[in-house]
Amino acid sequence: MAMTTSATRLGRATLSRLPADSRPAVLPGSVRAGVLHLGLGAFFRAHQALYVEAAMAASGGDWGIVAVAPRSRDVLEALRAQDHLYSVVTLDGAASRTRAVGALTGTVHAASDPDSVVAHLADPAIRVVTMTVTEKAYAPDSAVTRLLVAGLAARRRADAGPITLLSCDNLPSNGVVLGRLLAGVIPGELRDWYAASVRCPSSMVDRIVPATTPALLATAQRDLGVADLAAVVGEPFSQWVIEDDFAGARPDWAAAGAVLTGDVTPWEHLKLRALNGVHSTLAYLGALAGCEYIADALALPGMTDLLRRYVATEVAASMTPPEGVTVAGYGDAALERFANAALGHRCLQVAMDGTQKLPQRALSVLNTVPDPALATLILAAWARFAEGRSDSGQELPLNDPRAAEVRADLSTEALFGESGVLPVPDPARRRMIDLWRAELATHGAADLVRRTVA
Ligand code: CS2
């Protein structure tokens, strides 16, 4: 990244140098803050921030975003040096399109300045909190939960009015999960106010946003003519389905292309199982087969057929899709998106946090359909991945909050038994996982995929 630091940086003063179609839809400084976002990751910058910006561009409103970085300061500092401007590079095959975004009005570092987060939560101008804090933060003792509780207490004391907390994490019924979590930990004296003034709608978010690389920063600089150290990359596709249950005002997200609906559940199940579950399958089988990228894993002989079969049979049997959508059709569209090799999405990035992701992505299928012939393979692939070596003996890191527990006993009973990390209550299904593990050990992932569809 050093190559770009001496170049002229993106910022208010350099906006006029950008190609006309790369300039932000909203000018920084022209709007006041109305949204607080928790989790300053790449996904937020390439997804929700764009919808907020488009909503303001279409319908106005003071919905500038104050974005909270939980731990790392890198992105926050890059943004502060750029007047909170950054750009999104959209990659479609060899073509790139880069556009600066002006939705951010400020940033806060939660670890060193939690009081500022609490103060924003108690500010009447902030009416919506969006959050991308990852699956593992939805726990009573997480830093995010503690901040929200302190912020809600301060908001009530300040009489700052109703507020909506909108989860954008890949969990089913994410709003219900958040609402229950908070209801269980807020102090008694907040309960009545909480029930009357706080809403936690669910939402389904979707856009493939791989981690930013130095090559991506170089692409952004080439397209913009100035350096942007906070650039992010995304695929062309983007979707946001939001439960329309807000405590007060919100950005005009419908004008920005989001879908507001009474029930997000069918969308959440479809996306988690037919897209994320398939993504995880590619990540584990691909990593075992020695593939660095998701697109390479998809190109393994037989892989597309295997995944199409899984989605059309097992995922389809596990759920009722939203009206007008077929599970198989949705799954095929997801595979086309995964084939976008320009994204350079690493198997190891998707493989992270398997214990947090697989319940909603794969156990939801494995434990419910009559014949989980391939869902059991997904869990077997994860277990073999957790053993720590690819089929050719390369070391595979287990990046997971429960890694120690997983590695302590890798037997099928320990991992998938009633009190295992990923419980599969039916012993017959555990035996199926065990058989797949033996097959993977004998043939390796690439060969096994080929044999399974032959
Ligand atoms: C991926 C998701 O890293 C992962 O686990 O499956 O981040 C995926 O790219 C997004 O959910 C797509 O919307």
Image: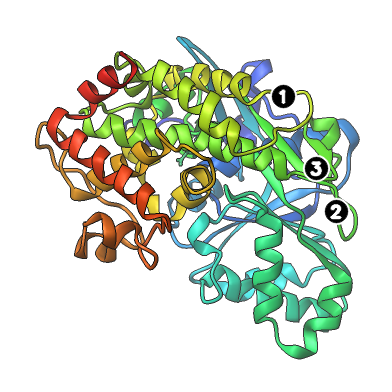
Badge 1: residue crowd in 10 Å (few <14, some 14–19, many ≥20): few
Q: CA distance from mark 1 to mark 2?
A: 23 Å
Q: Nearer the viewer, residue 45 or 269?
A: 269
Badge 2: residue crowd in 10 Å (few <14, some 14–19, many ≥20): some
Residue drawn at x 34%, y 50% as measured from the top left: 430
Say what secondary structure mark 3 lies in: loop
Q: Are marks 1 and 3 in contact (CB under 8 Å)?
A: no
Q: Which residue is mark 2?
A: 245
Say what secondary structure mark 2 lies in: loop
Q: Which amino acid does the dot numbered 2 rest on?
A: Asp
Which residue appears farthest toward the bottom when viewing the image?
Answer: 189
Q: Quadrant of residue 149?
A: bottom right
* Residue 316 relative to residue 259: left or right: left
Q: Quadrant of residue 214?
A: top left
Q: Which residue is mark 1?
A: 325
Q: Which amino acid does the dot numbered 1 rest on?
A: Val
Residue 86 horizontal/vertical position (percent): 57, 36
Judge whether 162 appears above or below 382 on screen: below
Q: Earlier in the sequence, mark 1 or mark 2?
A: 2
In the rendered image, which quarter contains the C terminus? top left
Q: Which residue is mark 3?
A: 30
Instruction: State which mark lies toward you, 3 or 2.
Output: 2
Q: Earlier in the sequence, mark 1 or mark 3?
A: 3
Q: Which amino acid does the dot numbered 3 rest on?
A: Ser
Judge whether 124 appears above or below 184 on screen: above
Say what secondary structure mark 1 lies in: loop
